[in-house]
Structures are given as C-alpha cells and as structure tokens.
Amino acid sequence: MQKQLIDDFGRRVDYVRISVTDRCDFRCVYCMAEEMTFLPRDSIMSIEEIQLVALAFVELGVSRIRLTGGEPLVRRGLVDNLHKIGQLDGLQELLITTNGSQLVRHAKALKAAGVKRLNVSLDSLDEAKFKAMTRIGKLPQVLEGLDAAIKEGFERIKINAVVMRGSNDDEVLDLVEFVRDKGIDIAFIEEMPLGTIESHDRALTFCSSDDVREIIEQRYALTHVPQQTAGPSRYYTMPGHSSRIGFISPHSHNFCGDCNRVRVTVEGRLLLCLGNEHSVNLMPLLRAHPGQVEPIKEAIVNAMSLKPEKHHFDLHEKPQILRFMNATGG
Ligand code: SAM
Ligand code: SF4
C-alpha cells in the first residue's frame, strides 16, 4: 500500500487532528451552546480505536498528530495511554490543544508521553471577561495550569485566543505582553461560523486578523516569519524577542491552497475539510475489524479523492456547517 496521502489537487496530507471527546468543562460562547447534549458513550471511539486510527495515519506518512476535542484532558484513560501514540514509529510530533483547566494535574504526564508542543486556549486575562467568554471557566485555574506546563519545559507553548469585538478586542496588547513575559507564543484566531450560536451575532463580533495586527503594530514592529509548515497560521516576531505572534484567519486570508490536514471526529468520521461536510465514516470499519489497521488505511487512502478544493465560510449567511467546533475537533 502507498506510503503517502495525496489529494486530487496535489496537496500532501501529513497532519491529522483527532478529536478524543466532545465533552468539556467549559462552554465557550463561540464553540458551544449553553445547553449541550453530548454523544452517548458507545457512539464515540474507544481509546484503543483512537490509537488504531493514529497508527493508520502514521503508517500512511502522517508525521504530526494533534489531539483535541472537546477538552482532551477530560477524556478518561487518554493521558495514561498517550505514550502509545507518542511512541509510534514515524510520528515526529504529538501535539495537544487544551483549555488548560487540567494542566496542573497532567502537564508532567503529557511531557513524559512524548507531547512536544502544547496549545493552551486563553482569550482573556480578566477574570470576569474570561468567565463571560467560557461561561464556566476559572481563570486562575488555567493560569496555574499554564505555569505548570511552562515548568515542564515543552518545546513550545502557544496561547490560542479567539478575538471577539466588544468582548476581548481591548486585551490584544495585554495578551501580547503576557506571552512576552512568559516566553511563549500566541495565535489570534478569527471566529469561524461552526454550529448555531445564539449568544452573539457573529457578523457584529467579528474582528479581523488585520485589525488585531494593527493594534499590535502600534507598539511593536512585526516581522513575518517564512512559513515552515503548510497551514492556516501566519507568524511574526517582534524585535529582540523570541515570542512569536500568529494569526489564524479563515475569513480574511483563505488558506485552502496549501491545506495539509484532515480531521477525525470523536465519532470516527474522517472530515476532509473543516468548512465542508465531505467525510467518510471510519466507525463501521473500526467496529467490524477491531485492532486491524489495514481496512482503516484503505478507507483513508480512498477518502483523499473527496478532499474539496476550498471551504465556504460566510459571516452573513446562516452557518452551513451545523457541527459545533467541539464535535469537529478544533
Ligand atoms: N478544549 C480545547 C481548547 O479549548 O483548547 C481544545 C478544543 S477547542 C474546540 C480548539 C480551539 O478551537 C480552541 O483554541 C478554541 O478557541 C477554538 N475554537 C472553538 N470554536 C471556535 C470558532 N467558532 N472559531 C474559531 N476558533 C474556535
Ligand atoms: Fe471547551 Fe475548547 Fe470548546 Fe471552549 S473551545 S468550549 S474549552 S472545547
């Protein structure tokens, strides 16, 4: 069987994001509704099935895996078994995106399992605003978690901040100062229209990466860092400082041309594009052939021809993608 995943537009897929749970201990306004119904246990991948999917991708030449969710660190059994993914032959990077709430408890184990880089979501440094954006999150818990992770000495730690006009757009410079002090990176994210959200009008709260960049450039000159890996982020540095500032701009800068990634939802659905519904359900195969990697590999190879050329996001239309971000795996 082939060793590389290449789609019909010649793009090589070497990066997969796997959602390991749809559950979360926060309810961020841009990601979830206030009242969420979570998936029944038997419809989500077991830890063994997640490992098998990871193995299949690595055997097909994928070198980076990001585990996400939902909140990956609330998935029972994940951290204890993480080394089985971290040690896969051929995997260069195991990455995790977390809201940070459980990092005090898990930072050490993540490092030991082979996680090299962490993304920690943090939209505000103001306790009240943080609470408003996450609905139930506690800022001190996340800050302690972040410090615990910094102490472990991961190769890189990056803050993810979704910027919403009227909520946290006045904190852009505070967040920049914060990452400079900590010696970590930050990526500012434009909100994507995933799931039906009633707490705010996305067209009104939208804050473009260009606007965020303008705010930062009032204080620091930004130098573009040439792209090291394909993907939606553009990175910049500030003079005399190692922290990098990134912008993830699904609206204002279309990034589909060099898309190198696919996603697997916690229900085992292989999504070929974040902004389209093209997908293949791997779950029937996982259940029909427990522990067998070849059928999964074959399905993944065949799915490549379904990867669409680009996404279609429009702030002024009703969301076409009815999946919430937590089910998709951000
Ligand atoms: N719970 C973890 C966390 O918050 O980091 C991992 C999952 S979360 C879905 C992954 C990332 O997606 C987070 O950085 C979050 O801010 C981002 N996100 C969630 N909903 C989004 C949306 N509608 N638009 C843009 N980013 C979003
Ligand atoms: Fe949970 Fe992450 Fe979604 Fe916030 S963004 S609700 S922390 S999954």
Image: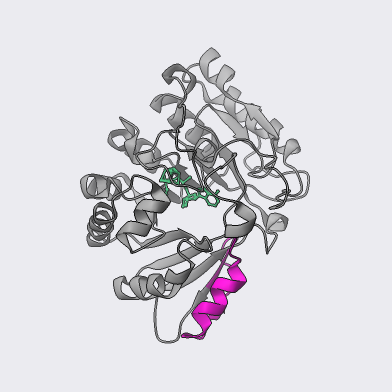
Q: How is the image coloured?
A: one colour
Q: Position of residue 240 (x, y in %)?
A: 40, 86
Residue 212 is drawn in which quadrant?
bottom right
Q: Nearer the viewer, residue 65 or 193?
A: 193
Range of residues picked out in magenta: 206-235
Q: Residue at (64%, 56%) from the top-left corner?
A: 203
Q: At which x and y percent is residue 139?
A: 29, 55
| Residue 146 belongs to the span the image colors magenta | no
Left or right: 229 in relation to 110: right
- Name the side, left or right, on which 149 lies relative to 38: left
Residue at 50% x, 44% y: name it.
31
How far across and how far down the image is residue 255, in percent? 68, 58
The quadrant of the picture showing ligand 2 is: top left
Whether residue 226 is visible here, answered yes or no, is no
Q: Point out the residue furthest to the top here.
A: 288
Q: Nearer the viewer, residue 29 or 239?
A: 29
Between 42 and 1, the residue placed more toward the observer is 42
